[in-house]
Amino acid sequence: MPTENTLSVPCVVFALRREALYFRRTYPLQQCFPDAPCHAELRGVQGTDVLMLETGVGAAAMATALRWCLSSLRFGERPYRPRLLVSAGFSGALQPQQHVGDLVLATEVIDLQGHRWPAICPSALAGCNIATGRLLTAPELVSDPQQKQRLGRQYEALAVDMESAVAARLCRQHHVPFACLRVISDDCYTALSPQVVALLHRGSISIALLATQLLRRPKLIGELGRLARQTRHAAQKLLAPLSAVVRDG
């Protein structure tokens, strides 16, 4: 349990800068943490403070960021312990009823080995039109429609991401309340080309690699444009419910 001197503002964890696009605009910067292993900032508006992490893509990046956050972070003499940690960002649909921009509030997170971790349903989202259910975490980007639909049936999951199981596991170990709010950025019927998957693999696109791929396959411009529109829409849809959770958390 937090001590009297502990700073315990909520923590919102994104993998990508683009996922945090509208959140960053809404919550002004207060403090940076240059020694953090990821992009870490204290942000706040109208008396609501929140620690925001941008960890990078994948389980290893998430684990490194959260071990620092949950074990080492201090504000001067005050240790930090989040009263709520929220894994937020994009996910891929695994069910046909999930469309781009739809929100998913996880009731539990599961990995491919069948390990499960519970997630709380924040009271701020009670009564909201948000799908609730299981979220699957996979080690790689799931880009093939047949694989998406197979995983949806096998794990009875609404959506898939690459980080939330790690966050859920570490929060459980550190006795920190965990919530997972995701937004669909691609549906279960649309494929991503291998070239786009390669570009997105590290979470940020190399300009040199992008130029090379576009010279080889100019049609990628259309696919990348569609992705940009979808992720921008998804990030915008995430803002209001995530802000409600942060204010209440």
Image (tube, grey):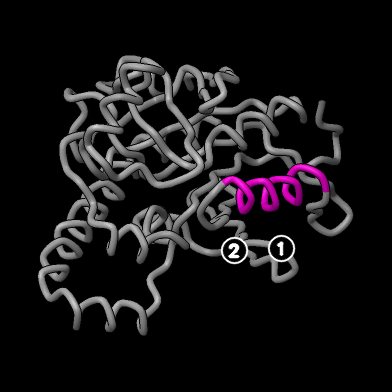
Q: Does residue 30 appear to the left or right of 109 in the view shown?
A: right
Residue visible at 63% across and 61% down in the picture: 38
In-front residue for pair 153/126: 153
- For label 2, count other residues whose C-alpha is less than 10 Å away and answer few (under 14), some (14-19) or many (20+): some
Give above or below for 46 relative to 165. below
Distance of label 2 from label 1 (alpha carbons): 7 Å
Residue visible at 85% across and 34% down in the picture: 4
Q: Amino acid at mark 1?
A: Ala
Residue with the mark numbered 1: 36
Q: Residue furthest right?
A: 77
Q: Is residue 45 magenta?
A: no
Q: Is residue 66 magenta?
A: yes
Residue visible at 53% across and 64% down in the picture: 29
Q: Amino acid at mark 2?
A: His
Q: Does residue 191 appear to the left or right of 148 in the view shown?
A: left
**Element assignment for label 2:** strand
Residue with the mark numbered 2: 39
Magenta segment boundaries in residue numbering: 59-71
Say if residue 133 shows up in the picture. Answer: no
Q: Give the quarter of the image for residue 228.
A: bottom left
Instruction: For the residues labelled 2 and 1, say whether their Cβ atoms are less than 8 Å apart.
Output: yes
Give above or below for 77 relative to 104. below
In terms of secondary structure, what is the magenta stretch mainly? Answer: helix
Say if residue 132 shows up in the picture. Answer: yes
Q: Give the quarter of the image for residue 128.
A: top left
